[in-house]
Amino acid sequence: MNIERTRIILEDLERTLLQFMRKHGITHDEYRCATDILVDSVKAGEETLLYDVFLEAEATDNANIDRRSSIEAIEGPFYLPNSPLLKAPYVLPQRCDEAGDVLFFRGIVASPDGMPLAAAEIDMWQADAEGRYSNFHPGVPEWNLRGRFRTDHDGAFEVRTIVPPPYEIPKNGPTGVVLKTLGRHFFRPAHLHLKVRHPRYKELTSQLYFDGGAYLDSDVANAVREDLVVQLVRRDAPRDQSVRGLHKSVFEVRYFFVLEPRPATHIRHRV
Ligand code: MBD
Ligand code: FE
């Protein structure tokens, strides 16, 4: 980040917080209570949950103004880099009896002028049918429902996973206590998390929600945007025996990703 911009922002942040404290006559006890919440949320393993719930969506809105590419979405606190690289046909890592309806997620990755992007990497993570994220919530196998895969020659991809449920934020941790004090519920609508990468384009962090799902209008993180809501369409079970044998409902969602080109970094001056 630009050092001058950082200085201006920090000065304004300090001024804004000091004005806020003066306005409410914040006492020493109240000040300590606030720092305890921040420290406890990290100690409780909530990482950036508190900030992601209250602030992250605002940052994406700022980034999405006048955008020519797909809009970005909040990352949330449960992303981990270096998830398993999958082999086609792509199936997100899961238990052999993974609970939840089968979901085929299909889509295309393209440039703003509609050129399909081959070998773009899609890095996907989501909660299981009980609303738990692997590597964070105990009892879920490592890297469950996390994986990376690539688009084919036509910029297309397909991956099999499960339909996640709405996600309930831990009620008893510091973030939960703050939400309870505000009288809010603890739910986010069901969602898929994604990052899309291609060497010549900017990385896109996205998140997709299902039309008609619960909490779309009252997401505790206030992060649902119209362009991120996809149709969950019921499908006949494919011939693939591994899915057929499970006797589950099969659904499909589609999304068309448009990536923003990276600004040119090498400008050659001819003399
Ligand atoms: C999540 O799964 C999430 O995406 C966010 C933003 C906050 C808490 C849990
Ligand atoms: Fe999430």
Image (spheres, rainbow, N blue to C red):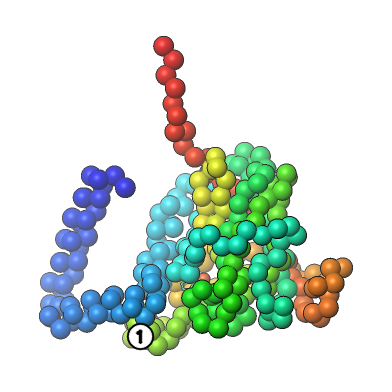
Residue 70 vertical position relative to residue 262 in the rendered view, above or below: below
Query: What's the amino acid at mark 1?
Result: Val
Q: Nearer the viewer, residue 243 or 186?
A: 243
Observer-nearest residue: 162 or 30? 162
Residue 58 coordinates in the image, percent (x, y): 39, 61
Question: Outermost residue, top direction?
Answer: 271
Residue 122: quarter of image: bottom right
The quadrant of the image that shows the C terminus is top left
**In front here: 100 or 119?**
119
Q: Quadrant of residue 184?
A: bottom left
Residue 215 visible in the shown view: no
Q: Which residue is label 1 attached to?
A: 177
Q: Specify whether residue 125 is in view.
A: yes
Residue sitting at x 65%, y 56%: 149
Compared to residue 134, the image places residue 205 above or below, namely above
- In this rendering, position of residue 89 left or right of residue 65: right
Please give the name of the residue rendered at 70% of the width and 65% of the height, measured from the top-left corner.
91
- On the image, the x and y values in percent for residue 32 come to 18, 80
